[in-house]
């Protein structure tokens, strides 16, 4: 059975034009005028865009003595409700655990996923086994990204020695290293000092992680990546200090990517001053929300191209879970939600305010990350042959965000009360309608793992990858990097 999306305006990262879309066997079969098919979806008055890709989620993540509460079922249902059609989660090996074991554990969590997904592999310790298994992860398991936590001392954190070893291995394998960039040693000392001085509430979480902690680590990771001859992707870039390091590196020709979160773009540190402990603790995440000058910097980065991707870092804990940290802010599970709200919030605060064009919206929610992760144009594109992961976006539909109507399993929403204008009329995952306005039609188990090839000899990204590594050998010209 075929499906036609009829009467809409197609918006991609580089074009806006009127055309219908024919979908067959889960893929875009044709784009053109007056196409015929079995099932007609009326897109009149709507923008037809590539479904969102959220490259940063933690579904059912074991963390700080508990598990994040959205699993691959509720998390991907929330994603689809907000127009996101693919998520990339993190497989986290325990200390001394095999990467391949961790990967199997993460695959086992996904049987009820409603949309497609992929994984980044975390490097949480270093040894010969990790070195060897990284090759299998890349060449056999379809994963071309490795995440490094520079914070969470005593848990996920790796040191510079481990990071430099892993980055060099990434360079050899044609893989991209990712970093959570905060100086974990400094954070640990600041936390201890604050607690010793009696600052135990959620606001102290923000004091323990000032922007300098992030700026220093971002700059360090960039320099280490440069010495290893590998590009770098910096997750949850939240401050001007971190953005400045990325901007400067890019101006020197280094291939560095930055990923602000929708939370950091639209919520600020005053949330931690709320007299209600629950309100403040529900917003505890790392890096913490910043003041408005940092928000301006992040928006400017998206506008100018020095930051490329908007994600959520969706890691949702219930209020009861957050209460593990009553009397000691360092025990509040770090993480916030956002999967359902990323696209409507970015449209409302980005496109409707004139900060972003519609094409830039598509770029930063879908196409750029598809290119960075080497899955373009299977994902992130409206092109013949691409997966029919599509959102039919009604720019006039409105709602007020509320935990009472959300798909996420938790009991609150950090965007509670925000009015958004611009929502999906339909969300399609590989051609199947999963969302029709407020009606959820998701199918548990529909989601499939998306393999991602390394940047290497075997694929067309070879020339791109050579361009990434080659600048190590030549004097830098100061010409900005091309592409995303
Ligand atoms: O606070 C956060 N961001 N929790 C999730 C884990 C991480 O650091 O990304
Ligand atoms: Zn992180
Ligand atoms: Zn994260």
Image (cartoon, rainbow, N blue to C red):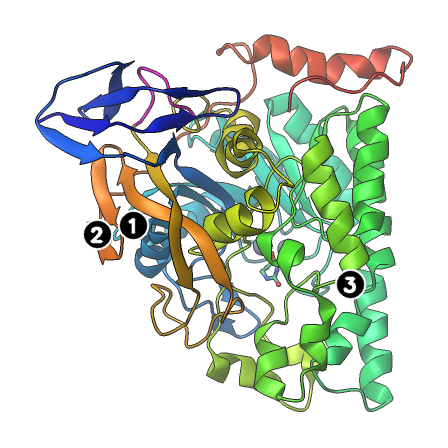
What's the magenta bit mostly, secondary-structure-wise?
A: loop
Left or right position of 35 against 283: left
- Say which residue label 1 marks: 113
Magenta range is: 381-387
Left or right position of 436 against 260: left
Q: CA distance from mark 1 to mark 2?
A: 6 Å
Q: CA distance from mark 1 to mark 3?
A: 36 Å
Residue pictured at 87% horizontal, 89% vertical: 197
Residue pictured at 18% horizontal, 16% vertical: 35
Q: Earlier in the sequence, mark 1 or mark 2?
A: 1
Estimate the x, y position of residue 124 in percent, counting from the top left: 63, 51
* 112 and 28: which is toward the camera: 28
Q: Kindly check if marks 1 and 2 are in contact, taking CB atoms under 8 A apart as contact.
A: yes
Magenta stretch contains residue 247: no
Estimate the x, y position of residue 446 in percent, counting from the top left: 22, 43
Magenta stretch contains residue 385: yes
- Say which residue label 2 marks: 444
Rendering quadrant holding ligand 1: bottom right
Asked whether the viewer can see residue 160, the reply is: no
Q: CA distance from mark 3 to mark 2?
A: 40 Å
* 258 and 469: which is toward the camera: 258
Helix, strand or loop at mark 3? loop
Q: In what quadrant of the picture does the N terminus appear?
A: top left
Q: Earlier in the sequence, mark 1 or mark 3?
A: 1
Left or right position of 451 against 174: left
């Amino acid at each position: 059975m075929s499906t036609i999306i009829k009467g809409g305006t197609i918006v991609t990262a580089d074009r806006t034009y009127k055309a219908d879309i024919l979908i067959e066997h889960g893929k875009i079969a044709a784009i053109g005028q007056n196409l015929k098919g079995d099932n007609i979806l009326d897109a009149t008055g709507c923008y037809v865009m590539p479904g969102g890709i959220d490259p940063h989620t933690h579904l059912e993540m074991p963390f700080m003595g508990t598990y994040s509460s959205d699993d691959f079922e509720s998390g991907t249902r929330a994603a689809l409700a907000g127009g996101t059609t693919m998520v990339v989660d993190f497989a986290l090996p325990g200390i001394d655990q095999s990467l391949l074991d961790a990967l199997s554990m993460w695959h086992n969590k996904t049987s009820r996923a409603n949309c497609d997904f992929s994984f980044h592999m975390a490097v949480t310790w270093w040894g010969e086994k990790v070195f060897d298994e990284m090759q299998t992860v890349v060449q056999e398991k379809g994963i071309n990204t490795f995440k490094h936590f520079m914070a969470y001392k005593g848990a996920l954190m790796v040191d510079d020695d481990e990071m430099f070893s892993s980055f060099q291995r990434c360079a050899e394998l044609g893989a991209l290293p990712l970093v959570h960039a905060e100086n974990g040693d400094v954070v640990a000392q600041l936390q201890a000092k604050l607690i010793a001085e009696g600052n135990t509430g959620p606001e102290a979480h923000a004091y323990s992680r000032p922007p300098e902690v992030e700026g220093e680590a971002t700059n360090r990771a960039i320099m280490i990546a440069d010495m290893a001859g590998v590009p770098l992707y910096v997750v949850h870039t939240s401050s001007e200090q971190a953005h400045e390091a990325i901007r400067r590196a890019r101006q020197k020709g280094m291939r560095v990517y930055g990923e602000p979160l929708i939370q950091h773009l639209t919520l600020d540190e005053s949330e931690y001053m709320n007299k209600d402990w629950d309100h403040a603790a529900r917003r505890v995440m790392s890096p913490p929300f910043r003041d408005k000058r940092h928000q301006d910097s992040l928006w400017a980065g998206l506008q100018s191209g020095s930051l490329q991707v908007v994600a959520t870092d969706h890691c949702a804990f219930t209020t009861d879970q957050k209460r593990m940290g009553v009397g000691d802010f360092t025990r509040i599970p770090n993480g916030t939600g956002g999967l359902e709200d990323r696209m409507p919030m970015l449209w409302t605060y980005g496109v409707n305010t004139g900060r972003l064009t519609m094409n830039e919206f598509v770029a930063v929610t879908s196409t750029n990350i598809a290119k960075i992760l080497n899955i373009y144009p299977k994902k992130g594109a409206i092109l013949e042959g691409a997966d029919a992961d599509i959102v039919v976006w009604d720019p006039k539909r409105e709602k007020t965000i509320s935990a009472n109507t959300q798909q996420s399993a938790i009991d609150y929403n950090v965007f509670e009360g925000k009015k958004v204008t611009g929502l999906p009329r339909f969300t399609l995952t590989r051609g199947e309608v999963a969302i029709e306005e407020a009606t959820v039609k998701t199918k548990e188990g529909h989601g499939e793992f998306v393999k991602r090839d390394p940047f290497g000899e075997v694929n067309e990204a070879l020339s791109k990858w050579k361009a990434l590594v080659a600048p190590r050998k030549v004097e830098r010209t100061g010409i900005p990097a091309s592409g995303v």
